[in-house]
Image: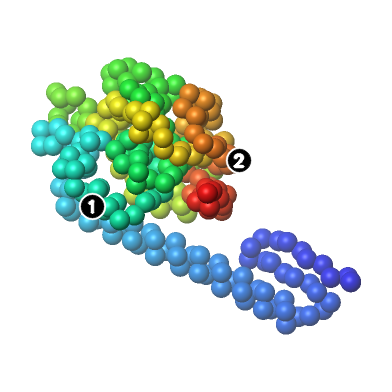
Amino acid sequence: MGNRVICMKKKDVVIRSGGDGSRSKRVNRSQRKLLADEESLHRRALSMAIHQAQVSQRFDGSMSRRIGSTSSRRGTLSDPFANNKQVPEFLESLTVILVGHSTGGACVSYALERFPEKISKAIFICATMVTDGQRPFDVFADELGSAERFMKESQFLIYGNGKDKPATGFMFEKQHMKGLYFNQSPNKDIALSMISMRPVPFGPMMEKLSLSAERYGKGRRFYVQTLDDLALSPDVQEKLVRENSPEAVFKIKGSDHCPFFSKPQSLHKILLEIAQIP
């Protein structure tokens, strides 16, 4: 009787319980340790991201090579499976749950078409869950306009093969990315993400997928909607699940386009729930 819990800022969390000062000190020490561990984790992750960016720049050499120069190689969704060895060998002895985020949804769809027997569940997190004959870019048409118009008018295009050749990719400016992708994410995560951001290659975005009812159609698909998403709006996500119905739909309130930053616990709970569905 008479015990009270007072919730304050993280640095000032105090529990008052019948004058038990030692318990309050223990809680404060525990809270400080948690904050220190979190800060240390962020610093280590930031250091790793910076190192990764430096190594990437050292070996990539030029922007055209980083985003796929069409003169040296053609970056398409089919390239990773061209030799029919890489993925089959990896999946030969196991089945997996594939998770795709944003434009990575098209990669999951393609894998589901190629290896449906090896994929127990496919999870699309605010992702491009395309239909047969559709391009990943088409999903963003409501936000970006038609592909043809975007290629002509966008100020974010990258010309890896020279200005006299077609654009090879695009990348938004940092301020645009913050507003589109991270409008609900913590500043620390935004800063870390900015170091790792890379241009989006046009090759995979503009390639139409061929998806069959016999293979892709038999896969178990699950969709996670992000309800405060400014990159792929909730209306567009709703249209995707309406036109290409998955087995189940989950919704995360207050999440931007990157729920692993803005709502990590909610996303974690949903992923575990899907994994446990028989």
The image quadrant of residue 161 is: top left
* Above or below, 267 relative to 253: below
Residue at x 45% of width, y 39% of height: 220
Can the viewer see residue 53? no
In the rendered image of this protein, does residue 11 appear above or below residue 254?
below
Q: Residue 79 or 220: which is nearer the viewer?
A: 220
- What amino acid does circle 2 point to? Lys
Question: Element at badge 2?
Answer: loop
Residue that carries the numbered disc 2 in the rendered image: 253
Q: Position of residue 36 (x, y in %)?
A: 52, 70
Q: Is residue 24 left or right of residue 94?
A: right
Image check: 112 left or right of 242?
Answer: left
SS at badge 1: helix
Q: Position of residue 141 (x, y in %)?
A: 40, 22
Residue 118 position, x and y percent, is 34, 47
Residue at the far right in the pictured view: 1
Could you tell which of marks 2 and 1 lies nearer the N-terminus? Answer: 1
Indicate left or right for 264 with 88 as reference: right
Residue at left offset 44%, top offset 24%:
143
Give percent across and percent down for residue 145: 39, 19
Residue farthest to the left? 72
Residue 25 has which mark? none
Circle 1 packing at 10 Å, graded few (<14), some (14-19), many (20+), is few
The answer to whether residue 145 is seen in the rendering is yes
Q: Which residue is mark 1?
A: 89
Q: CA distance from mark 2 to mark 1?
A: 39 Å
> What residue lies at 28% left-to-right and 59% top-to-bottom?
51
Residue drawn at the location 17% of the way across and 39% of the way down: 82
Three-letter amino acid code of the residue under disc 1: Glu
Residues packed near mark 2 inside 10 Å, few (<14), some (14 to 19) or many (20 plus): few
* Quadrant of the snapshot with the N terminus: bottom right
Q: Nearer the viewer, mark 2 or mark 1?
A: 1
